Image: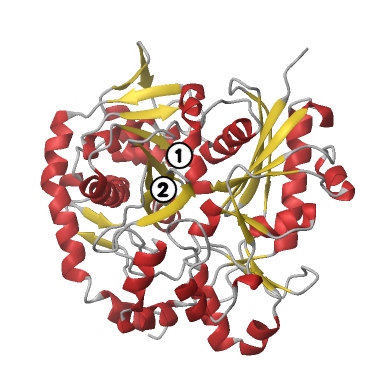
Amino acid sequence: MEMGLFVGLDIGTTSAKVFLYERHGKIRGQGKAAYTLLVPEPGRAEQRPEEIMNAVAEAFRRAMINGGAKPEDIEAVGVSAAMHSLMAVDKDGMPLTPLLIWADNRSVPQLAELKRSGESEELYALTGTPAHPMSPLGKLLWWKENKPELFETAAQFISIKEYLLHRCFGLYALDVSTAAATGLLDISGRGWCEKALQLAGIGKERLGEIVPVTEVLRGMKPEMAEAFGLLPHTPWVIGASDGALANIGSGAASLGNTAVTIGGGGAVRRFVSNPLTDPQGRTFCYAFSEDRWLIGGPTNNGGIALRWFKEQFMNGVLPGPEIRDAIRAQPERRQRRGRQHVVIDPSKPGHSSLDDLIALAMSVPAGADGVLFLPYLSGERAPYWNPDARGVFAGAGLHHGRQHFVRAVLEGVLFAVNDVTETLSNLAGPPERMLASGGFASSAVWTGLLSDMTGLRIDVPSSYEASAFGAALLAMFATGALNSLDQADGLVGILRSHAPNEENRAVYEKLYPLFKDVYRRLEPVFPELVSMQGRL
């Protein structure tokens, strides 16, 4: 008899993804459906919850068709969702507001006041969440101050995962991992933080019930099961945040392993056995289970920085003779993949313009001939938690060309990631192993540069969709298909590994302190620059 399939559902920032996995981790089918990110005015980032629900259903349908799966083939569904989302609903669960996502910065004034009063430090010690507009706590403070009637009449304040589960099962429940990222949960993971609730002006009855990440839900509403192509009695494992599940899905479920993810933004995370906060408040500490906490730091500017540069400064240039000549002129570059050597030839047909950009960057040596890039185009979270930080090129001269600026962008994104890695290492010790996931992991060049910059071996898992895989692995554990969560690491295949290039490493060891120094010197200037944007 053929073994059943485990589903990993990942509700991300821009799309819903559904993957069907066999027990040993092989992908049997996949589906994806996008939804709209609304920016009604600067600093706001919203989505339509019903559009997300429709996308989830469509992603399920596509995955089932793609994998040739029947409803009875599904053993369990595990759920991953982006952190920090919040919406208000009425007593019937109908939305009163759009969904505010992690990128929504409208609560900057409210969080600034928390910092001025000193209450942010107390809250960090109690919840493990730095004071930042991403936090649902900030969103509640904004609603309380700016929409008092809405704030008072809303029956519940919920995340997108809670909205999904309420639609499917008729209950409001939130896993401890996602709850930990709200800024409202006690760092122990055992309940809502009274101090945070008092500041927010709500009681715990207006928030969901906190349950373990292994909580199993059954009895899906028949109409929702039909929409998703599932059986009503199919078990759903409530799962965790996308960040925690990315660790599990990339092979960093065990203590000591560190995961780095770069998609549109980025993050560095690891599991520890006890709550661990930073004396300077630079990292988060989120409860996950009775014996695990997730520590780390997110960055705002990953692939979006490279995409911004391409769209603003390379439009109409790609593919062009300058880039093709640079690609042909660069020496052959090799990356180790198992026991074989894979030749990276970005000039061959089929490469995208982003591949061309990376190839152009590699036509100049490490360090971009002294050009540095602060990638803080949309402010920054860890380790500075500064929404006013902005992007900067430093060191540019008349002799620098596009290739230098592209390389500086690639390196600037990784310098920011290294800043978080260094902070975590100082807090919890150096990582035993670092695993890379997210869109950047598809580029052997970019992950190789990360190894050069950090001085660490970088392993790239065979599945880049780490959060979805992590959700499926957690579903396996919760339903007994895995005996322990540590077993999950053994199901994660490694596509390739990188060791540092010592010549490049020496260059980055000189540039990295300069990168941090440029930020420190400009930090007092950023708020004034931001205040002028849109006014001149």
Residue contact between numbered discs 2 and 1, judged by CB atoms under 8 Å: yes
Q: Position of residue 186 (x, y in %)?
A: 46, 63
Q: Residues within 10 Å of mark 1 (few under 14, many from 20)?
A: many
> In front of the other: label 2 or label 1?
2
Q: Which of the pair 412/197 is nearer the observer?
A: 197
Instruction: Identify residue type, mark 1.
Output: Asn
- When the figure is inspected, residue 6 is found, relative to residue 56, above or below; the finding is above
Give the image quarter of residue 458. Answer: top left
Which residue, given by chain and number where applicable, does mark 2 sit on? Answer: 294
- Nearest the eye: 452 or 272: 272
Q: Quadrant of residue 51?
A: bottom right
Q: Position of residue 170 (x, y in %)?
A: 79, 57
Residue 106 in sight here: yes
State which quarter of the image contains the C terminus. bottom left
Q: Residues within 10 Å of mark 2 (few under 14, many from 20)?
A: many
State the count of labels.
2
Q: Earlier in the sequence, mark 2 or mark 1?
A: 1
Q: Position of residue 217 (x, y in %)?
A: 73, 45
Image point 16% across, 69% down: which residue? Answer: 521
User: What residue is rendered at 70% in x and 83% in y?
Assistant: 153
Secondary structure category for the residue under label 2: strand
Label 2 sits on what residue type? Leu
Q: Quadrant of residue 262?
A: top left
Q: Which mark is residue 247?
A: 1
Tell me the CA gap for discs 2 and 1.
Answer: 9 Å
State left or right for residue 491 relative to residue 78.
left
